Image (tube, rainbow, N blue to C red):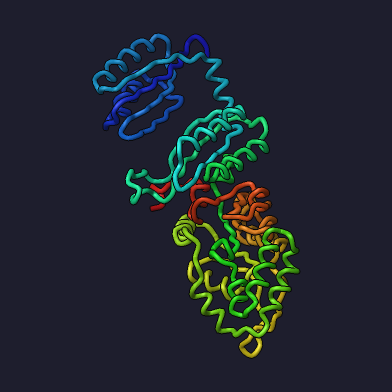
Amino acid sequence: MGNDVEIIQINISGEDKPGVTSSLTDILAQYDAFILDIGQANIHQTLSLGILFKTTPSRAGDIMKDLLFKAYELGVHIRFKPIPVPEYEEWVGLQGKNRNIITLLGRQLTARQIAEVTKAVYDQGLNIDSIIRLTGRIPLRKDERAPKSCIEMSVRGTPRDRAEMQSRFMTLSTELGMDISLQHDDLYRRCRRLICFDMDSTLIETEVIDELAERAGVGAEVRAVTEAAMRGEIDFSESFRRRVAMLKGLDESVMRDIAEHLPITEGLDRMMNVLKRVGFKTAILSGGFTYFGNYLKQRYGFDYMYANELEIENGKLTGRYVGDIVDGKRKAELLRLLAQVENVHISQTIAVGDGANDLPMLSIAGLGIAFHAKPKVKATARQSLSTIGLDGILYFLGLKDSYIE
């Protein structure tokens, strides 16, 4: 490129109406102009359209004149900006490099929340390329308000301190009541294929072993051990043995009653419906029990289920278990195994869980999400979801309500 090339950026704004983009690009076509970039957004029937094109200096004047007349005829505003060739080439050189996606998610998003996140982006020397809304339009009446709100930002550049940025996002999420996800915008983010879930306090809003313990009359004792294990204060395998031993003598029929009344986590139905429609393989990797895992597997259509099996003799629990314990290490091994079975790269996997024993699988998955997690888990995981239900995961994948409803 040189003096024989003129690069011009045009920005059009005004009332959105049919034919604006068609009419303006038709003029560019008449002069054989080459479109280098184009982008359009609509907010409340107001159009914002940008076109970057190249032409020859001899044609530039006539093109701008015809575009100006057409814009006047259409009732929209148009601005012209010449772009120096070196500036354009520098911009091209940045294309696709060091791009991240920031997802803001909550019951509602306020100006304060968005302001604080965008300030953090600015302080890290990043530039926001685009902002899109993933959730549906928000009604004004409180009784009609959408139960969730999400926007996605595409940002360009390398953070000055990614760890500090992640830490700041975590602080903001706690202080302002929202979830913030920071992900590299790479090939793997766009082609996740396998998602693995913890069961207790993730797919269901309870710890089944606590439910069993209540029926066995040892609820307080077992619950104390469970909470200590989830906080990472007690080794999971040891806590598991101690808790199962307390269930000795419990009648097998109790398990069926508990399964039929499990409190299902908000958003599970919607999430599973969408994940299956877009081709995900799904798995339950649980430190809980096979009886309840199989119940959820059949009810929601999970592809795989691994959990611990309680030993039963003469219709009663013996206080022992069968086979190896599915602990944190085993969950990570199963995630790797399932990735191999499904022939997907580990970066194409997602893991979701709430407890300390989920951290190994959260750390090796391409996307590890701490769901309504304990403080230690939330602080360690790269991503967390605490403000809404499981279907919030769909927004971390970049899916819009308009795609999935």
Q: Is residue 204 above or below residue 7?
A: below
Regarding residue 186, the answer to whether it shows in the image is no
Q: Position of residue 67 (x, y in %)?
A: 32, 17
Residue farthest to the bottom, as pictured: 314
Q: With 303 as the anchor, is 150 left or right in this view? A: left
Q: Is residue 110 above or below residue 215?
A: above
Give the residue displayed 31% in from the left and 12% down from the top: 65
In front of the other: 368 or 168: 168
Find residue 161 and report its image quarter: top right
Regarding residue 305, the answer to whether it shows in the image is yes
Give the residue displayed 64% in from the left and 72% down from the top: 220
Residue farthest to the left, as pictured: 73
Give the residue displayed 62% in from the left and 38% down from the top: 168
In front of the other: 191 or 384: 384
Q: Position of residue 361 (x, y in %)?
A: 67, 56
Q: Position of residue 393 (x, y in %)?
A: 52, 52
Q: Is residue 358 above or below residue 46?
A: below
Q: Position of residue 180 (x, y in %)?
A: 55, 43
In front of the other: 222 or 22: 222
